[in-house]
Amino acid sequence: MTKNKKRLLDVSMIGISAAVLCVVSPIAIPVGDVALSLATLVILVSAGVIGAWKSTAAVLVYLVLGGVGLPVFSGFTGGAGRLLGPTGGFLFGYLLLSLVSGLGRSRIVTMILGNALLYVCGTVWYTVYADVPVITAAGACVLPYILPDALKIVAATAAVRRIKKIKT
């Protein structure tokens, strides 16, 4: 494959991943201040299929699109206020989730670690934003999501394996 074709393929994969994230993320179930969406599933699959750097670039595109006001965040919202609001730590934590999940040979371990970092980013941000104790923030930002996120990790692992078999 020529260098230009590889570059075009890379840009296309970043664009497709960002587009899927933009389509799926707004559809969410409100659970307190932090909504439950399939955004993390899309990020995990993207990281496993196209790798850490390209999937992180796709998340960055998603954050920029949402930050300028396109309704791509949960609940069909967007704007800088969402990036700086109570869930901003989770939105920025998507970058770490993508980067860490796409690294390493053991996808399930890196996905779990990436998710843990997402929880830390979101919980710390929420603690500061809402001026609540860490334990209160963890109860709101982590506990309700552990089981759904574990299921997303299992689903993402299976999807990545399947997609990689198709690719080869």
Image (spheres, rainbow, N blue to C red):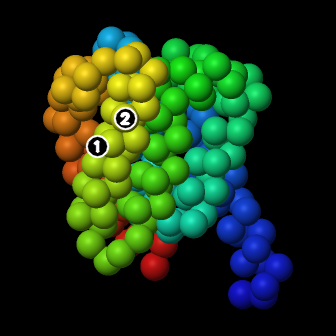
Is residue 16 visible in the rendered image? The answer is no
- Please state which of residues 60 and 159 is positioned toward the viewer in this rendering: 60
Q: Which residue is mark 1?
A: 152
Amino acid type, mark 2:
Val
Residue located 38% across and 61% down the image: 101
In the rendered structure, are the residues bearing label 2 and label 1 in contact, judged by CB atoms less than 8 Å apart? no
Check the image and name the residue furthest to the right: 4
Residue located 56% across and 57% down the image: 56
The CA distance from mark 2 to mark 1 is 23 Å
Amino acid type, mark 1:
Lys
**Residue 70 x %, y %:** 72, 24
In the displayed structure, does residue 133 sit left or right of residue 23?
left
Residue 142's tag is none
Quadrant assignment, res 134: top left
Image mark count: 2
Residue located 50% across and 68% down the image: 51
Task: Name above or below for residue 56 compared with residue 33.
Answer: below
Task: Name above or below for residue 135 compared with residue 158.
Answer: above
Q: Element at badge 2? A: helix
Q: Which residue is mark 2?
A: 124
Task: Name above or below for residue 152 compared with residue 57.
Answer: above
Q: Quadrant of the N terminus?
A: bottom right
**Residue 113 x %, y %:** 28, 57
Q: Earlier in the sequence, mark 2 or mark 1?
A: 2
Q: Residues within 10 Å of mark 2 (few under 14, many from 20)?
A: some
**Residue 57 x %, y %:** 63, 56
- Please state which of residues 8 and 39 is positioned toward the viewer in this rendering: 39
Task: Name above or below for residue 86 compared with residue 118.
Answer: above
